[in-house]
């Protein structure tokens, strides 16, 4: 496999990924791709807005390190992978995964915000990850209790409740927490992956 990753310096001295070119060597069955957390001693914290992601060959799984906190607007738009694990990501900006037709699974642990249209066209995705901004929850001794949605006029028809919120496990969904959400047709509750 031959990979090329390009970076840009941020004002705080960290790096953002601006381009990923993934080329699978013919005959190589590897189809997983890990995005590094450091380059030349500098921390990578973001996949930049409108990053150019090109692939030659099939990618099944992408993993980002916990230091990457932001997936920029349209960053993975139209990419052809099936599954992404983004444990440290706190913000997924507008259109970040739009048009990822093969995307079936998104694993998150720290997600706070999900931008408009972030998962448009991801018809195979079992549930749109809910950022903590879209949930009402309480931090209890045992973990997180889901109390409901912040806005009863949910924009989701498929919703994925995360396994963790602010790094703590979701241990309970309160009775009637999602009762007033008429638009949700499918609910996925993620356990640890």
Image: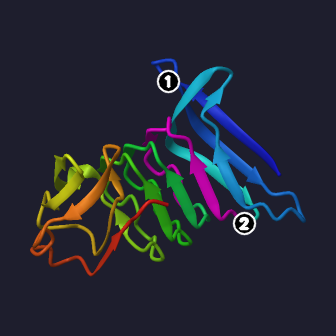
Say which residue appears at 56% left-offset and 63% top-offset. 83
Q: Which segment did they paint magenta?
A: 58-78
Please name the predominant secondary structure of the magenta segment in the image.
Answer: loop
Task: Verify whether residue 112 appears in magenta.
Answer: no
Can residue 114 be seen from the camera position used here?
no
Say which residue appears at 20% left-offset and 46% top-offset. 141
Say which residue appears at 19% left-offset and 67% top-offset. 154
Cα–Cα gap, marks 2 and 1: 31 Å
Q: Which residue is mark 2?
A: 58
Can residue 186 be seen from the camera position used here?
yes
Task: Verify whether residue 77 appears in magenta.
Answer: yes
Across and down, in percent, residue 30 comes to: 78, 60
Say which residue appears at 23% left-offset and 67% top-offset. 155
Q: Secondary structure at mark 2?
A: loop
Question: 96 or 139: which is nearer to us?
Answer: 139
Q: Nearer the viewer, mark 2 or mark 1?
A: 2
Which numbered disc covers residue 102? none
Across and down, in percent, residue 136 comes to: 15, 55
User: How many callouts does the rendering have?
Assistant: 2
Across and down, in percent, residue 167 comes to: 35, 44
| Sequence order check, earlier mark of 2 and 1 | 1
Q: Residues within 10 Å of mark 1 (few under 14, many from 20)?
A: few
Across and down, in percent, residue 139 comes to: 18, 46
Report whether 52 appears left or right of 115: right
Report whether 164 appears left or right of 51: left
Q: Which residue is mark 1?
A: 10
Tell me if residue 121 comes above or below residue 17 in the rendering.
below
């Amino acid at each position: 496999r031959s990979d090329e990753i390009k970076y840009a310096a941020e004002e705080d001295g960290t790096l953002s990924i601006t381009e990923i070119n993934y080329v699978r060597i013919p005959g190589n069955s590897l189809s997983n791709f890990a995005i590094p957390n450091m380059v030349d001693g500098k921390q990578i914290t973001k996949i930049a807005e409108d990053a150019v992601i090109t692939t030659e060959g099939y990618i099944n799984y992408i993993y980002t390190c916990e230091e990457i906190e932001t997936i920029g607007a349209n960053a993975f738009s139209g990419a052809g992978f099936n599954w992404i694990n983004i444990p440290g990501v706190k913000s997924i900006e507008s259109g970040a995964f739009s048009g990822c037709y093969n995307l079936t699974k998104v694993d998150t642990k720290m997600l706070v915000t999900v931008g408009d249209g972030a998962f448009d066209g991801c018809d195979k995705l079992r549930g749109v990850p809910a950022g903590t901004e879209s949930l009402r929850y309480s931090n209890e001794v045992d973990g997180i209790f889901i109390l409901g949605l912040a806005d009863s006029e949910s924009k989701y028809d498929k919703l994925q409740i995360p396994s963790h919120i602010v790094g703590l496990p979701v241990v309970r969904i309160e009775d009637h927490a999602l009762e007033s959400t008429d638009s949700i047709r499918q609910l996925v509750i993620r356990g640890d992956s």
